[in-house]
Amino acid sequence: MENNFKKINAICISCGNAQFDFFINKNNFDLYKCKNCRLIFVYPLPTDVHSTYSEDYFRGAKKGFGYVDYDKDKAPMVSAFNHFLDIIEKNSPKKGKLLDVGAASGFFLELAQKRGWDVSGVEISEFAASKARERGLNVATGTIKDVKANNGECFSVITMWDVIEHISNPIMAISKASELLEDGGIIAINTPDSGSLFAKVLGKKWHLIVPPEHLFLFDKKNMEDLLKKQGFEVLLTANIGKKFTLRYIFQVGANWLNLKLIKYMADFLNHNFLGGLPVSLNLRDNFFIIARKK
């Protein structure tokens, strides 16, 4: 029988447990699963996460993760982002200052700005942040740890779209978000759902297990617990469908399944207008959560 237990010097960031099952080695990284809350995480964490988010991550994806063309691949997400904003605006008392963490080239920020929000962002990739600034957006290069409230004025909303799973210290990120938010302010997060039926069926072959890009994989319960411990009241947790370009779907499939036919189709779509066609895809293995600072 395979021995799937390895003793590691770690504490679960969600529940505080210190017992873990070895889950899988992927891309030369070990992943473990908390025996109590089922949080999946990379251990040890990579020492350099910045290098993952080079220009290739946003324009090329030749290293096996990222986007063929970030802005074009995100274009079908307009309806989902507007849905997110609809929910935020129902729960936020005013359209005040909004901070987008992991803002990339500012695609979401432009949508929020058009709806009347006072927007700014922070992005770890200098390449992506510079593209956002070229669009006239206030996006700094760095992480949420580097953000300061200007003149003591806090944010009404902080968003983290498909980013918390990339952060090497999620507790710091959520704690810092609480510090930056005004009382009653909103945090909104979208992230892969390791507790989803699709993830459970695929198990270790789930396509969203992609270290060093994804370092933590949450389910709804352990994410709710993490937020509550940092002083947030969870308002809503839900699965929300997304749209992707055909090009992006085949690129992910090629990296995931490593099949020649899919790789051929991915390469074909990368150089064909058909690759930009939007496709609705809801595997229900991502969840949206919104919480209020008490």
Image (cartoon, rainbow, N blue to C red):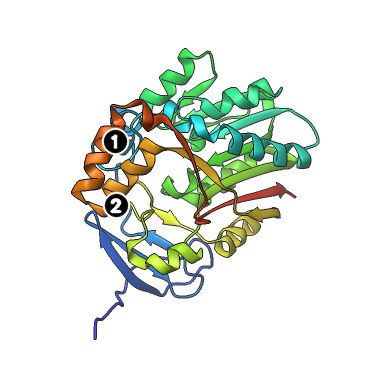
Residue 35: give x, y in percent of width and height. 44, 75
Residue 147: give x, y in percent of width and height. 54, 31
Residue 271: give x, y in percent of width and height. 28, 27
Q: Residue at x 57, y 26 (%)?
A: 109
Work out which residue is located at the far bottom of the displayed protein and give it.
1
Q: Nearer the viewer, residue 194 or 164?
A: 194
Residue 257 vs 62, above or below: the answer is below
Q: Is residue 52 left or right of residue 122?
A: left
Q: Nearer the viewer, residue 251 or 126?
A: 251
Secondary structure under the numbered disc 2 in the rendered image:
helix
Picture quadrant of residue 124: top left
Task: Give the labeled residue for mark 2.
Answer: 256
Residue 283 vs 65, above or below: the answer is below
Q: Say if residue 186 shows up in the picture.
A: yes
Picture quadrant of residue 142: top left
Determine which of the numbered discs, if any, sits on residue 61 in the image.
Answer: 1
Picture quadrant of residue 88: top right
Q: Residue at x 56, y 29 (%)?
A: 108
Determine which of the numbered discs, if any, sits on residue 124 in the image.
Answer: none
The N terminus sits in image quarter: bottom left
Crowding at dot 2, Cα within 10 Å, few <14 / some 14-19 / many 20+, comes out as some
Crowding at dot 1, Cα within 10 Å, few <14 / some 14-19 / many 20+, comes out as many
Q: Residue at x 51, y 48 (%)?
A: 172
Q: Is residue 3 left or right of residue 154?
A: left
Looking at numbered disc 1 in the image, what kind of residue is underneath it? Ala
Looking at numbered disc 2 in the image, what kind of residue is underneath it? Trp
Disc 2 or 1, which lies upstream in sequence?
1
Residue 97 vs 242, above or below: the answer is above
Query: Which is closer to the viewer, label 2 or label 1?
Result: 2
CA separation in Å, label 2 and label 1: 13 Å
Secondary structure under the numbered disc 1 in the rendered image:
loop
